[in-house]
Amino acid sequence: MATSRITDGTERALLENMLDRNREALIATARGLSEADARRRLVASLTTPISVLKHAAAAERIWFQRFWAGLEESECDGYAKRDVGTFAVADDESLADVIAEFERASRRSREIAARFDLDDTREIPDEGTISMRFTLLAMIEEFARHAGHGDILREQLDNPLT
């Protein structure tokens, strides 16, 4: 997907554009890495370029498929056992697989979000009443933060300190 350049327009268009820009930025932090580099742990946590994308795909499913579409966890795209965590990447999953999973989840999120007005609300456990506006803003923040993590990881991979 090419980066959109919508910088004016309706509130909805601005929110959706910014979310798509952050999705694209997150993918860009990992695109072109070797499989080994995509999995290289540079911090104490499970945060690697590939695991951040895996987590982002899970966030898409949780917020849009589970909360907004009302699907059971087992009905969601890319359903995986909850006990392995959202950062867990199977040994047989390639970087291309995980990018494709995130892109599929993002497409599905766009389709689900389009069914709702910004002021529509849902009751979410541990969150309370949330609107679609809040959801889009939360996802913008989530993916911007993780794209920043990805930028730092990519910098470490491309220019390691000796």
Image (cartoon, helix red, strand yellow):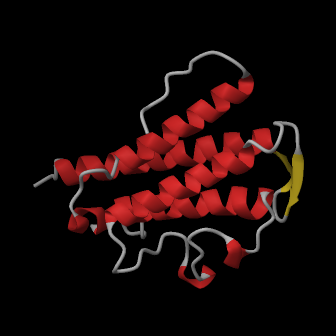
Please state the horizontal and vertical placement of residue 127, each as a whole percent of the image.
Answer: 82, 57
Please give the name of the residue rendered at 65% of the width and 51% of the height, measured from the top-left corner: 109
Instruction: Using the image, determine if residue 46 lies above or below residue 21.
Output: below
- Locate residue 146 relative to residue 7 in the image: left or right: left
Say which residue appears at 33% left-offset and 63% top-offset.
95
Q: Is residue 41 visible?
A: no
Q: Nearer the viewer, residue 3 or 48?
A: 3
On the image, which quarter does residue 10 sit in? Answer: top right
State the count of labels.
Answer: 0
Q: Is residue 66 left or right of residue 25?
A: right
Q: Nearer the viewer, residue 95 or 160?
A: 95
Residue 57 in percent (x, y) is at 54, 60
Query: Can you name the residue that lies furthest to the left here?
Result: 162
Q: Residue at x 88, y 43 (%)?
A: 120
At x 88%, y 54%, the residue is: 122
Q: Is residue 40 above or below residue 9?
A: below
How far across and down, in percent of the image, does residue 160 sit?
Answer: 16, 53
Asked if residue 60 is positioned above or below residue 81 in the image, the reply reads above
Quadrant in the rendering for residue 77: bottom right
Up the image or down, 32 lies above or below 14; here it is: below
Q: Quadrant of the N terminus?
A: top left
Picture quadrant of residue 98: bottom left
* Quadrant of the rendering where the C terminus is positioned: bottom left
